[in-house]
Image: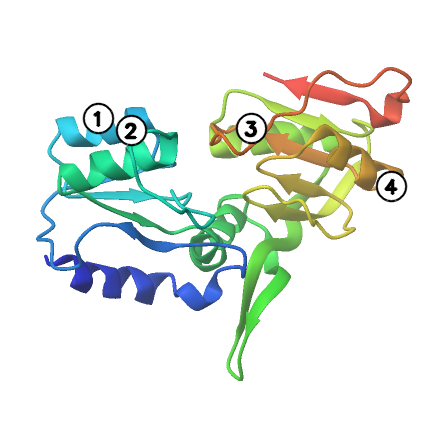
């Protein structure tokens, strides 16, 4: 398939208009007339990923996080971004990213379906027209009432991940929960908030508002920092717990 035709299908599945204003999804590098036979899918276009894609003879590197976020003034092999672009182009490989438009179009809805949330709705509306509204995250009622600790176990088992860390009183009852795949930095003040990546200082804020939070330990890109040790002096109700 010619790349421009494949891009048209990808854009139909995850419209670029769904992306956040700061984001840069779409074609990062490559020829639109490229004949694409092999696609390599990855979270990030790291140097190791690009080398492996070259090794298997991929025509297109399809990533979640964009390779280019900010404007660049030159493309050379003297910096890490330029070096990756040079490697892509010299091997005639295109790179395409589906980031927050994919979060809006597919990721949050699929996560809510996996958790079997009852009547899930968009957590943060980012796109709206006369027919429907879309956005980041989902909020809904859990299939059964459970404590925060039980909810963390449920998340761990549902997504099949090695371990889950959560913040708050383990015995807090959870009925309605919000799920925000990705960074979830602007989560709403709901009874429970589950994010893909949650910095420690950001976890403490909802706790002071009486909202427990959990995060899964999914592999993340270089732009995602993980929370460190719990700060001393934090009360038991604000402590970080780990399951698994």
Q: Position of residue 40 (x, y in %)?
A: 22, 38
Q: At 49% across and 44% down in the image, what residue appears?
A: 114
On the rendered structure, is 202 left or right of 35?
Answer: right
Do tag 4 and tag 1 residues touch (Cβ < 8 Å)? no
The residue furthest bottom is 130
Answer few, some or many: residues within 10 Å of disc 1's Cα (few below 14, many 20 plus, some between 14 and 19). few
> Dot 3: few (<14), some (14–19), or many (≥20) neighbours within 10 Å?
many
Label 2 CA crowd tier, 10 Å (few <14, some 14–19, many 20+): some
Disc 4 is placed on an element classified as: loop
Q: Are marks 2 and 1 in contact (CB under 8 Å)?
A: yes
Q: Which residue is mark 4?
A: 210
Q: Secondary structure at mark 3?
A: helix
Where residue 166 sits, quadrant-wise, is top right
Callout 2: SS: helix
| Count of numbered marks | 4
Residue ID for mark 2: 49
Which residue has dot 3 on it?
A: 156
Q: Position of residue 159 (x, y in %)?
A: 49, 33
- Front residue of 192/25: it is 25
Q: Quadrant of the N terminus?
A: bottom left
Residue at mark 3 to residue at mark 4: CA–CA distance: 23 Å
Disc on the earlier residue, 2 or 3: 2
Residue to which mark 1 is pinned: 52
- Disc assigned to residue 32: none
Q: Quadrant of residue 26?
A: bottom left
Q: Residue at x 40, y 54 (%)?
A: 25
Q: CA distance from mark 4 to mark 1?
A: 46 Å
Where in the figure is residue 204, as x and y percent of width and height? 81, 33
Closest to the camera, between mark 3 and mark 4, is 4
Residue at 11% x, 59% y: name it.
33
Q: Nearer the viewer, mark 4 or mark 1?
A: 1
């Amino acid at each position: 398939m010619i790349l421009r035709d494949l891009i048209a299908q990808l854009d139909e599945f995850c419209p670029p208009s769904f992306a956040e204003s700061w984001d840069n999804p779409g074609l990062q590098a490559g020829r639109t007339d490229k004949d694409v036979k092999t696609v390599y899918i990855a979270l990030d276009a790291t140097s190791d990923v690009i080398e492996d894609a070259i090794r298997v003879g991929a025509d297109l590197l399809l990533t979640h996080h964009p390779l280019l976020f900010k404007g660049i003034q030159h493309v050379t092999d003297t910096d890490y971004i330029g070096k990756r672009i040079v490697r892509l182009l010299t091997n005639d490989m295109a790179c395409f990213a589906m980031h927050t438009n994919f979060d809006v179009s597919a990721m949050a809805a699929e996560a809510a379906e996996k958790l079997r949330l009852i009547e899930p709705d968009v957590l943060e509306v980012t796109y709206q027209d006369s027919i429907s509204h879309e956005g980041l995250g989902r909020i809904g009622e859990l299939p059964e009432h459970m404590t925060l600790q039980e909810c963390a176990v449920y998340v761990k088992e549902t997504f099949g991940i090695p371990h889950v860390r959560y913040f708050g009183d383990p015995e807090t009852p959870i009925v309605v929960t919000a799920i925000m795949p990705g960074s979830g930095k602007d989560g709403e003040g709901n009874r429970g908030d589950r994010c893909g990546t949650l910095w420690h200082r950001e976890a403490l804020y909802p706790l002071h508002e009486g909202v427990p939070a959990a995060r899964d330990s999914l592999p993340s890109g270089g732009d995602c920092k993980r929370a460190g040790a719990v700060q001393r002096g934090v009360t038991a109700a604000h402590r970080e717990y780990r399951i698994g």
